[in-house]
Image: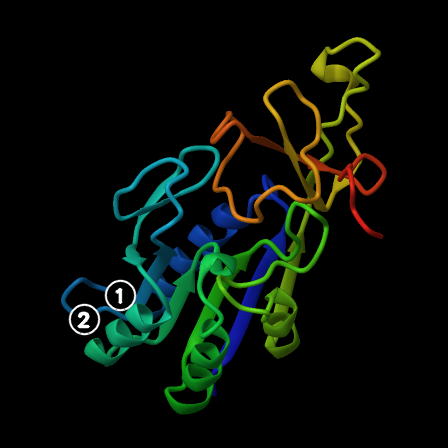
Amino acid sequence: MGRLELIIGCMFASKTQQLQWRVNQERFRYGHTEETPCVELFKPTMDTRYTQENQVISHDGVALPCVVADDTRHILSYVHDHPTLRVLGIDEIQFFDGEIVSLVQTLLRDRPMHIIATGLNLDFRGEPFCFRDSKEHMGTLMALAHEIKSLHAICAYVDPAGDPDPKNRCGDPAYYTQRLFPDGKPVPYTDPLILVGGKDTHNDRRYEARCFQHHFVPGRPW
């Protein structure tokens, strides 16, 4: 039967590293080769954090070849063209369109397929991450999952009034993604939802992992 395995958490929680490890496990299990592909890894076109090439790259620089997919239909077409596939790995699944939910359901039911996906369960506002141009969000996939691994990072908050030495960072488990201006101030709730980034400044924004106490979103209505 089909199986959906989700790896969720904030940024810097090692989700991609976990996915790479699982994909390599499944390739060993099924004897994956280029001639008879059994396990394929996908990432969304918009994920250009470290490269625009056909690679999934973790924050610590580990790379694994992948298929870059423009949208959900691209994944479905690829699966139809490769009948030997048994397992799909999908990195940053939250960046796909809302049709990804029905695709997952179809592949679990009709193929059946084992799907292993990573995703941000919450956006920078601390709300369920919606798929592109859709009201569907990661919570929908979580409800369908057979297994969920919730990972956390380490809270990087340092009191701006204190010593900026990294040794003084909070250090508590972090489950939230903090989006910041280059000067370290938190962006407001009205900031655009999708801005692909990492530890370094990107589009005049940067990110940190934060605990609940140190996750700040000015103008948040709740």
| Coordinates of residue 70 in the picture (x, y in percent) | 31, 60
Q: Amino acid at mark 2?
A: Thr
Secondary structure under tag 2 reads loop
Disc sitting over residue 88 in the figure = none
Residue 149, position as x, y percentages in the image: 63, 60
Query: Does residue 119 sit above or below 71 in this rendering?
Result: above
Foreground pick, 172 / 201? 201
Q: Nearer the viewer, residue 30 or 68?
A: 68
Query: Which residue: 55% across, 30% down?
Result: 205
Q: Which residue is mark 1?
A: 32
Question: Where residue 111 sits: x, y (%)?
Answer: 37, 87
Residue drawn at the location 78% of the way across and 42% of the way down:
219
Report if the CB atoms under discs 1 and 2 are less than 8 Å apart: yes
* Residue 81 x/y as whole percent: 19, 77
The residue at the point 64 percent across, 46 percent down is 10
- Tell me, for residue 36, which label it has, or none: 2
Corner quadrant of residue 208: top right
